[in-house]
Amino acid sequence: MGTILRKAFLEHVGQTSPSPMMVEVARAEGVFFYTPEDKPYYDLVAGVSVSNVGHANPAVVRAVQEQAGRYMHIMVYGEMVERPQVEYAVRIASLLPDPLESVYFVNSGAEAVEGAMKLAKRCTGRTEIISMRRAYHGSTQGAMSLMGAPEGEEWKNAFRPLLPDVRAIEFNSFDELQYITERTACVIAEPVQGEAGVRPPVDGYLQALRRRCDEVGAMLVFDEIQTGFGRTGEMFAMLKYGVTPDIVCLAKALGGGMPLGAFVSSRKVMDLLTVNPTLGHITTFGGHPVCCAAGLAALDYIVENRLAEQAEAKGALYERLLSGHPQVKEIRRSGLLLAVELGSSDKMFAMMEMFAREGIMSDWFLYCDTAFRISPPLTITEEQIHDSARIIRACLDRL
Ligand SMILES: Cc1ncc(COP(=O)(O)O)c(C=O)c1O
């Protein structure tokens, strides 16, 4: 049965990679997923920071079932008053600093980034967009245009022409802030760079970025798609660093395991999408009521179980358990988002093979294949951290 399914997967499911993992998933619970033979895998990726409250979280499953039974899709986004959407928007606004109060729900991270770019252009009347080198903001043509040069060229070159008037500066370079000028509509940055291989900001950088944007009247957009919902040790990384953007993009853990994205700004700014032209952004499924119900249940679970507060100590425990190993060159970390640097892609891929046999799910980063990722559900226990770190160390011993 498994062989037939795998063959059909390769023949009929559109493929993105020449070497997919090909592990068949039968079910998932907590920090584990299981194959049909009931082999458990520690999920140390969590769908790339999606499953922050763990797989099959009963609170989320209940919310999905209840809302699916009540109503699903009724009408394109923004016309009807749907309770799960309204309640979730109110809740998100209550956790974000002022003036981030108006939540525009969409389907995905890339769509949230598209919305943020459109809003910044509409608000400033300018066209230039500045992103960071080694940034990843999504794979639609607009979001892909932001993949910082020259590292992003491999992806962008095949699909040109992309968005004009986009330039990239070096994350953490104070010198390069001078390229943000009166021409700039917005600067978009991940407060902690994810696919660059976990690169936290150096002291004062995000503050200096904020100041420069204010000086020249450019909007600051934070992409918290990977860092949001407790991953870095605060509910949002912007709270950790004390810098408030004009627009924030959310997705991944936003939906509690269901597909959901959002961009959030002040109401005054957001309202610009309703005039000249009206319907400045249209999305059919944005803010789907089942996804909003799931996301709200997940967010409540994070708050009630103090998962954000615990992420720092859990990440520090992994760091302590792995950092002394002679194969580990460096650990870059923000909360429970870790890149374990081996200094060699051959070694990293050898680890992936051993991980697959030993029941560990990890991966590498778009711009960094010399390090492997540890970003498990935030619900992981101390005991599970010790146990998974023991397996990882045994694999490192065999390198
Ligand atoms: C920081 C960041 N922004 C945007 C995206 C794109 O999100 P999506 O895949 O939902 O379009 C990702 C996805 O990995 C991401 O990590």
Image (spheres, rainbow, N blue to C red):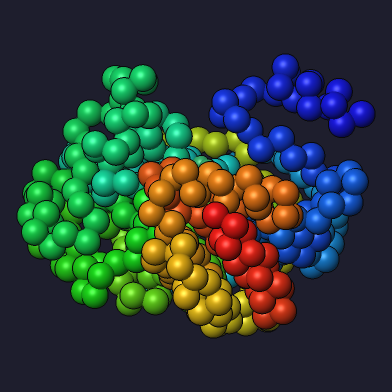
Left or right: where does residue 12 sit relative to residue 141?
Answer: right
Q: Position of residue 112 (x, y in %)?
A: 46, 46
The foreground one among 79 and 119 is 119
Residue sticking out furthest to the top = 11
In x, y percent, where is residue 168?
21, 43
Residue 70 lies, with reference to residue 285, above or below; the image says: below
**Left or right relative to 198: residue 212:** left
Instruction: Identify the residue at horizontal 34%, vertical 66% (top origin).
Output: 200
Task: Please say whether residue 287 is visible from this viewpoint.
Answer: no
Left or right: 24 in relation to 89: right
Pick whichever, 232 or 34, lies toward us. Answer: 34
**Residue 213 x/y as whole percent:** 17, 59
Q: Nearer the viewer, residue 355 or 306?
A: 355
Which residue is at a point 58% across and 63% down the rendered structure image?
397
Q: Quadrant of the N terminus?
A: top right
Locate the C terminus by quadrant.
Answer: bottom right
Residue 346 visible in rendering = yes
